[in-house]
Amino acid sequence: MTRWPLRQVAFVGFGLIGSSLARVMREQQLVERITAASRSSQTLALARQLGLIDIGYADPADAVRGADLVILAMPVNATESILRAIKPALSAQAVITDVGSTKGNVVAAAEAVWGEVPPTFVPGHPIAGSEQSGVLAGRANLFAGHKVILTPLPTTQAEALALVTSLWQRAQADVLTMSVERHDSVLARTSHLPHLLAFSLVDTLARESNNLDIFRYAAGGFRDFTRIAGSDPTMWHDIFLANRDAVLEALDGFESGTRLLRQAITTGDSEALLGIFTRARVAREHFTHMLAGTAYAKPMTAEKDLTYTVQPGGRMNGRIRVPGDKSISHRSIMLGSIAEGITEVTGFLEGEDALATLQAFRDMGVVIEGPERGRVRVHGVGLHGLKPAPGPLYVGNSGTSMRLLSGILSAQPFDTVMTGDASLTKRPMERIAKPLRLMGADIQTTGERGTPPVSVHGASTAAKGGLKGIHYDMPVASAQVKSGVLLAGLWADGETSVTEPAPTRDHTERMLKGFGYEVKVQGATASLRGGGKLTATKIDVPSDISSAAFFLVAASIAPNSDLTLEHVGINPTRVGVINILKAMGGNLEVFNEREIGGEPVADIRVRSAQLKGINIPEDQVPLAIDEFPALFIAAACAEGTTVLTGAEELRVKESDRIQVMADGLAILGISAEPTPDGIVIQGGQLGSGEVVSHGDHRIAMSFAMAGLRANGPIVIRDCANVATSFPDFLGLAKRCGLAISASE
């Protein structure tokens, strides 16, 4: 462990980065004595006047003599000459690091001076800065929330790396490590190339004859893009020359991209332009989520400590429309992407999971416009038009995306790896991998438990003659497995059929028919033949009954409630929550029934009722599998005992929903006894307390509604993932009458 304070730290160069880091050291008392060397006597005098250094030197060797840590903060092209100058004065134990934007030339300079890089040398690069430069521009918070990349070599001393890492962490930076070569390649694209383009654009326009008007009428976009052209020219001159090869490679890639744009504009290729622009619009946010390993959403809501606080009492009143059905939103993107023509979607759920599916197909070359207030236009590429993604497909927290995509990807002539966030990496994927292997797919899950990442070797499957149709008797009812197998069957030779042991949602079968693909359903068996085609259509996504469930339960348990939910999907395979609440004595009226895009839709009016405990019929379990957390709250408020059996599937959702709900109910004073495949809940008075959702959106929303019947506040931890299925849950719940607030 690094022991602060150090006796002496020496800076060679003392501009923006050096003076900012010195401010951190002074404020946190990390060092007893700071020395510095600079070519500018004025800089050194000003640094002493500001109290940032104790003494300054013109000769860098004098500055580093006796130092425990030496920080090279001068232009990168001066590295070798500076190292030669300070080498005789350095102590054998002195740790050396630098702040240069390129690392290959720094390592080469050290090798030229010492013959090999000293084990106490830790190359580094803080990715923070400003258009201003010099000692006066420095500030102690310059690095807070920014990344610092360290590029240790195999010979780097562990203690030296720990010291430099600790220093940057004290500056509140996010410290990462990578190889020297990788650093220079990445930074050439993310930092050096943007600066090069900004310099070039401003210089090009400044040399035009009408340059005065160009700059007079420049709008915000021009100012934003060219802001970095105000950076230090000398510093960037050195960087471009020091990282020449990587910069040229990045410039080649950019020029290739601009040629594609030019060609699309020249030929009037609207779809090519849309493809480039739509992918670019969301790319930065998408990759931020991939790097952080978080669920995918807009805006990002990855804070693990997001907390809901619900005050007791209240009632549910009004007319509302909850977000679009997540299952149908997923499938609208998937089938629209592999259809021929443009599929127009309204009511699309702009939650994390559905957005993850949308991004996956963008990564595979599908042009998708939106979403914009629930509207999406999918430019289908047909069954054989998907392209390899440039990297792994990241699906955040969406098990639906991963399982259904497994079926689609198994038939493609390219290989794919699918990854997800920390929660998804614990979810079982062998249940879809096994039947796909029976069809001839080459698909691997990870570890003994068969979890993500999932690797699909489509090219290997194609080499073996592609997929073959099978009949699959599902051991456990699962709409995701059924859908994944049927989707793979679109490309399979012959007939593919699936028989389920109990009814599950049939959105895939219904939507395939909506896209003009023949699907036969006879009893518990769904089947189709490969080799057909899908034709684009219009899809109006109904409101999600899983999202409606929280409000159906809330209005049932809260006194004096009268709430109408509009345009709710009442697919026969999804209405378990309605059937179970009615069996418990709930006052629900389903009216204005109609069919939209092959899916039955209705409005539902629900009023307060004195619920009774029941033995939940097992034939209703598959019809309400996602709604049980909310139904557990209804059971807690009911008179008598509610018994659930045959629901072992709940233990392998985003959390073990049986155990997590039982734990939370017990904290609130309710007797809830989990069993291997269900739970026994004794209704009573909900109390006050703090529960943990374990990152499960449905757990969080269910306990939020419990506040309507609690006798004190309920605090719910770890609620950030609510956005996976219900982006505006808080706002809608408040408007209906729930006293809920959120804090980080």
Image (cartoon, rainbow, N blue to C red):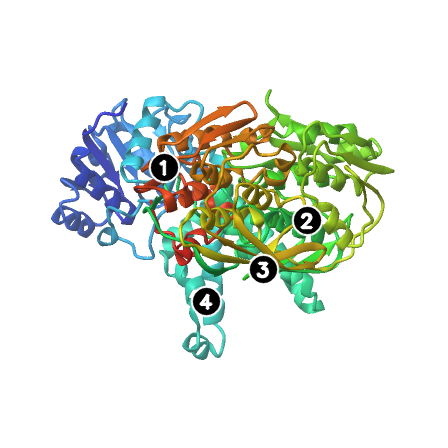
Single out the residue that lies furthest toward the right: 494
406 on left or right of 644: right
**Comes first in the chain, label 3 or label 2:** 2
- The vertical placement of 324 against 38, above or below, is below
Q: Residue at x 23, y 33 (%)?
A: 64
Q: Tell me the amino acid under the disc marked 4.
A: Gly
Residue 605 point in image, percent of width and height: 53, 56
Q: In terms of secondary structure, where does tag 2 sit? A: helix
Residue that carries the numbered disc 4 in the rendered image? 221
**Comes first in the chain, label 1 or label 3:** 3
Q: In terms of secondary structure, where does tag 4 sit? A: helix
Q: Residue at x 50, y 42 (%)?
A: 295
Which dot marks residue 334?
2
- The vertical placement of 657 against 341, above or below, is above
Residue 414 point in image, percent of width and height: 72, 39
**Comes first in the chain, label 4 or label 1:** 4
Residue that carries the numbered disc 1 in the rendered image? 685
Residue that carries the numbered disc 3 in the rendered image? 370
On the image, which quarter does residue 709 sit in?
Answer: top left
488 on left or right of 742: right
98 on left or right of 546: left
Q: Residue at x 53, y 41 (%)?
A: 584
Q: Tell me the amino acid under the disc marked 1.
A: Gln
